[in-house]
Image (spheres, grey):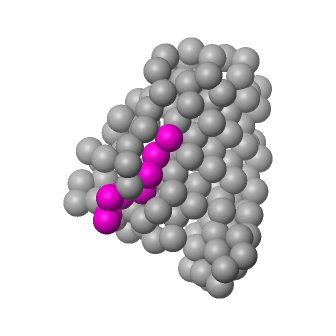
Amino acid sequence: MENFALEATRSTPAVHFDAATLLLEMKGESYPENSAKFFGPMVEWVTAALAHNADTPLVMNLELAYFNSSSSKILFNLFDTLDKAAASGRPVTINWRYLEENEMALECGEEFQNEVANAVFNLVPLGG
């Protein structure tokens, strides 16, 4: 497996997935014109990583200041995939990082957290 990285743009987050440590990071804003096209390779990478490194804990750090509804839908699906992996015994941690003054980001994180039953889902406030 190889690492996966994308530079941030005005409408897409920076993405870095480390194949050796299974650390997944996304930071920025996510409102791409075609969310399925943008997130497709990431979903494929996560699926392959889960199949390839069966014993390695997976950690996902997200810091999304803003995201649109189509990005939200894909994030729900991604969290569902991670939650199923955690239900099968893989250690999975999702860290939802948000600026303390961004109440919308906190509320979205809480909604995502409520959908995750098996993975560890942390709400991580950041100072402004």
Q: Could you say which is closer to the camera, residue 69 or residue 45?
A: 45
Q: Position of residue 8 (x, y in %)?
A: 38, 55
What segment is highlighted magenta in the picture? 9-16
Q: Residue at x 26, y 44 (%)?
A: 37
Could you tell me how many numbered marks the image carries?
0
Q: What type of secondary structure mainly makes up the magenta span? A: loop
Residue at the spot 66% in from the left edge and 62% down from the top edge: 97
Residue 74 place in picture, x, y as percent:
42, 51
Q: Relative to 61, say whether 22 is above or below.
A: above
Q: Quadrant of the C terminus?
A: bottom right
Q: Is residue 43 magenta?
A: no
- Is 35 in front, or is 23? 23
- Left or right relative to 12: residue 99: right
Q: Quadrant of residue 54?
A: top right
118 shown above or below 98: above
Residue 63 shows in the view: yes
- Give the vertical position of 19 relative to 84 (above or below): above
Residue drawn at x 64%, y 69% as measured from the top left: 98
Question: Which x, y percent locates residue 34?
Answer: 24, 54
Depth check, front residue: 102 or 110: 102
Image coordinates of residue 114 in percent, x first then y, are: 69, 61
Q: Quadrant of residue 52?
A: top right
The answer to whether residue 69 is visible is: no
- Give the quarter of the image for residue 108: bottom right
Q: Residue furthest left?
A: 33
Q: Is residue 1 left or right of residue 68?
A: right
- The residue depicted at 73 percent of the width and 18 percent of the height is 55
